[in-house]
Amino acid sequence: MIRIENLVKAFGAKRAVDGVSFSVERGEVVGFLGPNGSGKSTTMRMITGYYAPTSGRVTVGGHDVAEAPLAAKRLIGYLPESAPAYPDMTVHGFLAFAAEMRGLAGRRKREAIARAVERCFLDTVVHQSIDTLSKGYRHRTCLAQALIHDPEVLVLDEPTDGLDPNQKHEVRLLIRELGRSKAIVFSTHILEEVDAACTRAIIIDRGRIVAQGTPDELGRPLDEVFRRLTTTDTARR
Amino acid sequence: MSLAWTIAKRELGSYFTSPVAYVFLVIFLLLTGFFTFTAGQFFERGEASLAAFFGWHPWLYLVLVPAVGMRLWAEERRSGTLELLFTLPVPPWQAILGKFLASWLFLAIALALTFPVVVTVNLLGEPDNGMIVAGYVGSFLLAGAYLAVTCMTSAMTRNQVVAFILSVLACLFLILAGFNPVTDLLARWASPAFVDTVAAFSVVTHFDGFQRGVIDSRDLLFFLSVIGFALFATAVILRNR
C-alpha cells in the first residue's frame, strides 16, 4: 500500500532524510524507530504529502503523492506528532469537521463519528471543548480524526505519546487490531511497543535506515540492538 | 467547492465561539458611530448622504481588518493544525478560499449591522439610496482587499502580532500610494510613469468612485485583482512550508 523509493529531504545543507526506501503492505504494522531528530517525522510528513520530497518517490495505494495528492490523501489517516486539533471546537464538532472533509454526510457521517468515539474511548468528553481536555484525551481526539473514514493506510506519529500506561496499552491493542486489515506505519521510541504491536520494525538514524526486520530478526534484547545501531553512532559525531 | 464551504463554516464558527467576534462587532459599531457622527460631522453637513460614514472606512479598516484576519494562517501554523489541514484531501486553493470567505462573510455581517445609519439618514431626509448601496459594495470590496493582504501576511508567520503589523503596513501602503506627500517623495527620484503606476495602487482613489455612487468596472477589477493576487501569494507562501 505504501511504497517509498530513495526518499530524500534536505533542509538547507542538512539531509533530514537521506535515501530511505521501504514498503508496507496491507496487514502489516511497521514500527518506525529512531532517536529524536533521526528523520521519522519528516519521512511521515512526506508520506502524507505535507512535505514535498527533495528527491525520491512515495506512492500510496498506487497513487503518487506528488502527482495525485488528493487520491493518495483520501486513503490515508494521519496523526501528526503534536496531535493538533482546533481548540475552540468540541470533540464532536471536530470529528464532524473531519468527517465532512472526508466527504461523509448524513447517516454515514453520524456512524463514522460514533465509531471513532467508541474506538478511542471519547464518549465521556464528546461535547467538551478541546482546549479543556487533558493531553491524553486531546491526543485520542486527534487519533479519532485519523480513523474517521476507516482509511486503508494509517500513518501515526508517536500515537502513544503523552498517554498513561492504561491508555498506551489500549492504543497498542487498537493498532494491532486495525493492522489486520490496514497498512500501518507508526513511529515510536518506546521499544516495548515494537513487541506489543508491530509485525516489522525499521530503525532509522540520521536519515538512513540502519536495520529492519521482525523484532526477532533484529535480535534481543531490543534496546541493546537499538543502542548499538544508533547512540554509538551519535556519540561518535 | 463543498470542501471550501466546510472549511468556511468551521472558520466562521470559531469566530463566534470565541470572544473575538463580539468584541470586534461592538468596537466596529462604536467606532463607525463615532467617526460618522462626531468626527465626520454627520449633522453639521446638512446633507442626506452617508459620505461621513463611508469616508472613514479606509482608515477604520486599516486597523480592524488585520485584527480579524491576522489569526487565519498564523494560528494554524502555531497550533500545528496546518499539518492536519494540508494532509486532508483538499486542494490548497479551496482551503485558502474557504478561510478567506469565512472572514469576509464575518466582515459583511459587521457591515450589515451598521444598517441604523441607513435608517437614520432615510428618516431625516431623502438620500440617494443607490449611492448608499454603491458605497456599501465599495466598502465590502475594500474590506476584502485588506483581508486578502492580511491572509498573505498571516501565512508568512506563526506569530499573529507580526502578521498584524505587516498587514497594517501593507494596507497603509495601499492607502498612501495615492497620497500627495508620498507621490511627491517618489517623484524626486522616479519617473512620472512609475509614480502614476504606484498611485494607481491606492485603494482610496478606487473607493472614491463607489462613494459617489458609481460602480466602475475598473474599480471593481482593481479590488478583485488585489484580492486575487494576495490570495495567490498566500498559496505560494503556504506551498513552501
Image (cartoon, rainbow, N blue to C red):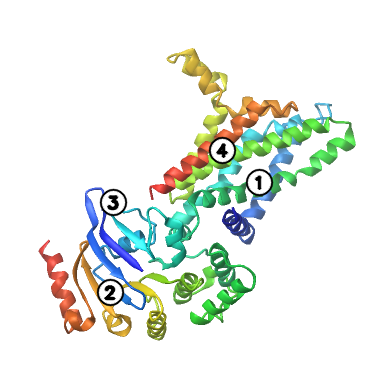
Task: Measure the C-alpha gap from mark 2 to mark 4.
Answer: 46 Å
Q: Nearer the viewer, residue A168 or A52?
A: A52
Q: Badge 1, how many Cα within 10 Å: few under 14, some, many 20+?
A: many
Identify the residue position indicated by label 4 in the image. B227
- Mark 2 in CB contact with mark 1 (< 8 angstroms): no
Task: Measure the C-alpha gap from mark 2 to mark 3.
Answer: 26 Å
Residue A227 x %, y %: 16, 75
Q: Which of marks 3 and 4 is in front?
A: 3
Q: Nearer the viewer, mark 2 or mark 3?
A: 3
Q: Helix or strand or loop: what does disc 4 sit on?
A: helix
Chain letter for the residue marked with disc 1 in the picture: B
Q: Residue at x 71, y 44 (%)?
A: B111
Report whether B95 appears left or right of A207: right
Residue type at numbered disc 3: Thr
Specify the label residue A54 is tagged with. Answer: 3
Q: Which of marks 1 and 4 is in front?
A: 4
Q: Badge 2, how many Cα within 10 Å: few under 14, some, many 20+?
A: some
Task: Measure the C-alpha gap from mark 3 to mark 4.
Answer: 32 Å
Specify the label residue B107 is tagged with. Answer: 1
